[in-house]
Each structure stands twice: as structure tokens, then as C-alpha cells.
Amino acid sequence: MSSTATNVIQSGKLLTRQALDVDGRLQIRLWVKGQSGVFQLIIDDQRATLFIEADYAHKAKSLLVNMAVDCQAVPLKTFNQKPVFACYFQSLQHFYRARDVLKREGIKCYEDDIRPDDRYLMERFITADLSFIGASQHCHRYRKVYEVKCKKTTEQNNVSLKTLSLDIECSMEGELYSIGLYALAKHNNNHEEFQRVIMIGAEQADAPSYIHWVANEELLLEQLLAEINTFDPDVFIGWNVINFDFRLLQKRFDKYGLPFAIGRDHSAVRWRQNSNANEHYFLDIAGRVVLDGIDVLKTATYQFASFSLDFIAQQLLGKKKQVTDVENRVKEITDNFHHNKTALAAYNLEDCRLVSLIFAKEQLLEFALLRASLTGLTIDRVGGSVAAFTNLYLPKLHRSGYVAPNMGDGNSDLVSPGGYVMDSLPGLYDNVLVLDFKSLYPSIIRTFKIDPMGLIEGMQVKAQQEDVSQVIPAFDDAYFSREAHFLPDIITNLWQERDKAKQQKNAPLSQAIKIIMNSFYGVLGSTGCRFFDPRLSGAITKRGHEILKTTKQWIEAQGYRVIYGDTDSIFVYLDNDLANAESLKLGKQLEGYINERWQETLQEKYQLDCYLEIEFETHFSKFLMPTIRGLDIAKGGKSIGTKKRYAGLADDKIVFKGMETVRSDWTETAKLFQQQLYSLIFNGEPYKDYLIKLIAQIRAGDHDEQLVFSKKIRRNLQDYKNTPPHIKACIIANKQLGKNHYKRGSKIDYVITVNGVQPLEMLTSPLDYDYYIDKQIKPIANDILPFLHTSFEQLTNSQQELF
């Protein structure tokens, strides 16, 4: 480190954060990437904080007499209107010890779970971008900044982060073979690739130049540290990279007594175990972020039948991985390690490259950065809806004179219902319109001023019988303040930013904002949130019920028929004889009519501006709402429609909702059959010959490869009380392959044979074609055929009678 310090004024993007004790005093460390490089901000003289009710202040002081604590009255109160004292601690050690003592003595602590580094940032409204000033000293590849003052920057920092994709190859026992590293960077309008595979083995003269040969596993690990130090990434990316690649690397470093020191300051990786899943870990690396592709896709609400890299690469990139024997991938990798190391290196590198391409194509890093910028969550945070809400809400709450409640404070016997789902009217229809309320729950929050503090303030006004015109009545005898609230304004700001993002065609930002806004109802309805109160969530969902029911009445009063509704959508049947243009025109007319009615109604009844907005979303020229299976309407059974299951033809494309085509637990043959049968019927084409031919093909064995079930094991095998087919297949396989071959997290392929369930890899009996026809083809056919006054049985029986 340089012996001289210079003042620095900079802005940058927050990478990682940490709070720790140094020489008995709390210190916060922030790693920031700025335009001129990387900075480690050292923030001293901070204090860990919790709050207690003023009535317990004297007792608390006597209990904590031997600790470095400062208890002061502060102008804050609880949601129960009780004044509080703040307890400030100079060290985390004293903070944690005092918290235990206070709770053990029955003294309730408020906000004692807020980490000091998070509190430091949120109270300054700092999310992902910040400005800072301090005394700077040069270290290796970064500058350390002392006497720091930070504030939220007024403009977003466009600093570019360096990503490095990492993937390991190993034996079944975890012995490392190679480590792949890949990066694609843009430099002077040119894309430059960094490619490296560190491979154990003797150097081969004709091998690709990207292979770095090492003699053994220990040297492999040392070379990895050297490569990371040289490349100096801001972000690691990978596929299951934390709980597989990095976990295994930690074990191999431990084996050789080497520190897994990949922090920017050469510090070791810090691990944290997920309290809800013992096999799941989080890690912290000083100055470096780790993003797992699977986690980011799920956080961004992507949905796939499988999140394997092979499947996602095919779905998003149209590319397949290089190993040809997918079912025996580890065996082929091991074989290549011993006999064809260059092929293994190519495979290793391709995995890294595929991850980079997926991140680039779907803008996953941009999504993670924008989410952090909007919420104050760390870039690598998985989930975190509750924490995001807390970050945005808590500092505003403090400035209004309240401390946050604890989890459980809002519990009561009240029950908040879910979204309203209407009973459907089953049928095969022409001309069905779908009208959708735009972000219904966020718009309800905006319109009716639903807010945790607003509820407390509103109930105070009502209890003191003050001017009730200042409150908005809700459900369950709840009242909300018209003026004292934050959440409606937070949503309004997010809504405006999303509109801008849409105009700018910024898909990652638009998606990030949508997810955050829609999460607020879930947060308020979750017992895992400190602001949970069923009066809050009920004010949203019960209002949603009222809105959907009222909207249905208005539409039917116009002479149309509502055949279904679900949470924020209304399905309207028009008339079989209407042309497409007429249907579209009616959809826009209904949209305008409903929006106008809601604006008038809410102004007249509550004197509220209306932020509810319904949109004409889809015109289905053909639409199927099935009956509940087992009720045969062709034979006079009572017609009861399904919920959350339908299919429709719109713009020459069939949309399936909740049907077998979009479910992972049906065979490929069943899915393709449903798609083809519905296409023929919706387009008015003959379908009987297709059905008969398919059954003949199944019995002839032509579809055997597509009659495979594939299912993931969600629990430990011994935890299954019943034994579903896929677990039976696992038990059969494990008897021959070893008791842990298939376990929680594994995926098994199996089939149904004349001798019952069998794992695909141990198939010894003929498939039971009658089972597949009866359980996979027949139910799908009978979802739609009765509306054509026929059935699967009638069509197949008539065919058999010909013989």
C-alpha cells in the first residue's frame, strides 16, 4: 500500500458489502466499481442499532451495564403508539450478546434483524449506485478509501462490469479434471474473447492454445487463483455455480490446505448455509459478485420444463452441448479425460461459453443490476421480495416517526382470500374476448391508498372519531389514511419508470419493475414479512373480488356473456357470427366503457382518483373451456367447468393454459396429440382419421421414444408416504445402481410396462399401450370431443366395429 493518501471524489456501482468488528469496533466495507477502477470503502464509527419500548429502558440499561451501549430516547414509536428508546452498540459482538440478553428477559427488540451495512445504505436511500468522498490509498488493483462519506448518486452509473464464466469438470467422486473460464467483452466496438481451460495432464503439442496444462490437482487450483487474479473479474457467472462448482472447489482447496482466496483483497470465500435448506449455500467474495444463471432466470420469472444448461441452451440459443451421450455424461467426461483431453477441454469451454451467451441474449446481468438499483438488494440476491420492500419502506417509515413491527405482530384470526376465480361456463366457443386489468393489485394499492402505516394512521383517526373524511373504508373494519402513506407513491414512481422503460424498449428494466410491483401484495400477505397484517392483504384481494364481480355485472348488462374470470381477467363470449374486425371493435368499446365506469364510480363513492385500467388483450376466434374430467356432457352429465385450464386460437396461434401441453408430467406423445387435435378442430379440419391413426401407431410401437415420463425428485426418497410411479422407478434403479444413485434433486426417466413401472435405463418388458391410450390420449380427447357431440369411446368403438 502507498504510504501517502489522496482525496478522491467518485461515483460507482456497489458490488459487495460487509459489516464486521475490527479491533473491537464495528466497521462497514463496501466494494465499488467506478469509471477509474475498483474501490474498497472503509466506513468506521458506525453503530449497530435496535429499538426497545421506553417502558423497558431502565431495566435494559441495568442488564447491559457491562456492554458498550448507548440507550437514548428517540422521536419514534411503535405501531401500538408506544414511545421507544434506541440502543446503539459500538461492536457487533456486543450487539448480538445484548440482543440475546434482552430477549431472554422478555424485553421485545425492534429491527434487531437489520444488518448494519444494510441500515447504513437504506437510511441514505442508496441502492446500487452511489457517490463517495474520502482519503484514498493505492493497493494491488484497487484503491482503499478511508474517512468515507457516501450518498445516493443522482444519476445511474454506466460503469461496465467484467464477467467471467466458470465451469468445472470432475469425476463422480469430485476429483477435478479441468476448469474452464470464458469471457466475452466489447472493446473499441470489437468483441474480444477470453478463453482458458486449465487441464490436468501432459502437454500436447497439437492441442488448442487456450488449454493450460498442469501436472496435478493442487497445481490446477493454484493456476485457477492466478487466472482469476490476472483477469480480475467483477462478476462470476455459471450454472449451479455456487452450490456445485464453488462448493466443490472449496472442498478441493481444503484437501490441500490451500486458502480459497479469490477475494479482491486476497481474502477467502465466506460461506453461509441456507437456514431453510441445509444443502443450499450462499457465498460472499470480497469485491466480487457470483450470479447463478438458474437463480437469475427464476428470479426474472422465466419458466421452463427443465433448467438444465442443455435444455436452456436449446430453448434460448438453439444450441446443444457437445457431449453426445447425455444419459451417461459423467462416464463420457471421465472417458475423455483419460483418452481425449482436448475433447473434454472443448466441452468444458463450451459450457462456459453457453452460459455467457445466455446471459448476453437474455440480458441477465442487466436485469440483476437494475433490480439491485430499484430495491437496494445485493446484485446476487435470490428472491428477496421482503427485503426489497423493507429497503424501500423502512427509511420512509422512520422519517414519519415509526419503528417497524416485528414478524408476528400483525397476526390475527382474519383470513385473507386469494384471487377471485369465477365458476366457468364450459363450452367450445367462437369469438371470446379477454379483458385484463393492468397490474390489478398494484393499481388497487395506488387507488385505495393501501399501506402499512396508512392502516395504523387510519385506524387512529377512526378510533378517535376524528374527521372520517380523511380515511378510506376497506374490509374487515379496516380504514386507511388518505394522506399518511408511502406504498402508493412508491408504486406510482415504479409505474412511471416502467412506462419509460417500455417506451425505451428496455426489456430488463421493464421486467424488473413489473416483478417488484407485483411482489408487494405477496409481501404484505406473507407471515415472513414484518408488515404482515391480513387487513392489508385482505384490502387488496377482497377489493379485487369486488372489482371482478362488478365488472362482470356491467358487461352482462350490455348484453354479453361472461364465461370465466380469474384474478384480473374477464372472458367475454360475444356471438358466433361476428367477423374478426367486429369482435376487435367491440373489445375496444368494452375496454373504454369499463374504464369510464370505474372512474365515475370511485369518484362518486369514495372521492378517489381511479388507477384501475382494463385492457382488451386477446380475441380468441375459437376457445375451449373444458369440463371437470369425469363429467360426460355428451351423456347428459352436469356441466361443471374447470378453472385455470383452457385453450384458444388467437392470430393463428393456439394458446394453452394449464393444459397437458404446458405441463412437464405428461409424455411428449400426449402433448403433441393435444396440439395437433386442437389445431384440426379449431381450424375446422377432419380429426377422426388422425386420432385412429395415432392409436394404431402407438400400438405398433412407433411412439415408444415419446412415451417416456420424466420427473424430478423433490424430497428424500424415504420421506414419500405414498409411492408414486417415479419413486417406484427410483427404488428399482437404486437396487442395482446403488442406493444413492437417484436421490433428492435427481431426475428420472421411466415408462409404464405390462409389468408395471420400470426405469427407462432398465427397461425389460413391453410397454403397456393400453395404459398410455387410456391415461394419456383418452383424457385429452374427451376434454374437447363432447362439445362436438362425440367422444373418444364412440370414435374408437366405431373403428373397431369395422373389423
Image (cartoon, grey):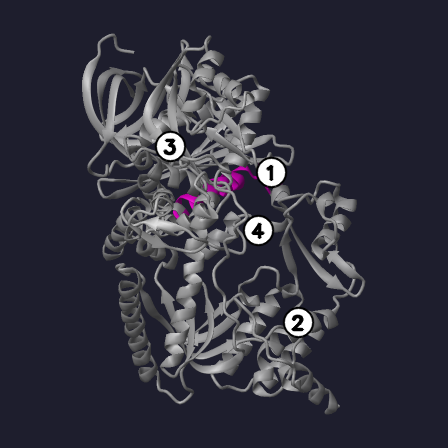
Q: Nearer the viewer, mark 3 or mark 4?
A: 3
Crowding near the residue tagged with mark 2, few <14, some 14–19, many ≥20 C-alpha atoms within 10 Å? few
* Front in this rendered view, residue 219 or 487: 487
Mark 1, residue position: 339
Q: Nearer the viewer, mark 4 or mark 2?
A: 2
Mark 3, residue position: 403
- Amino acid under label 4? Thr
Q: Earlier in the sequence, mark 2 or mark 3?
A: 3
* Stretch in magenta: 333-358
- Amino acid under label 3? Val
Q: Is residue 35 above or below residue 702?
A: above
Q: Which mark is residue 595?
A: none
Residue 675 lies in magenta, yes or no? Answer: no
Mark 2, residue position: 702
Q: Earlier in the sequence, mark 4 or mark 1?
A: 4
Element on which disc 3 rests: loop
Element on which disc 2 rests: loop
In this picture, residue 280 sits left or right of residue 522: right
Residue at (71%, 60%) from the top-left corner? 751
Residue 352 lies in magenta, yes or no? Answer: yes
Cα gap from disc 4 to disc 2, whole angstroms: 23 Å
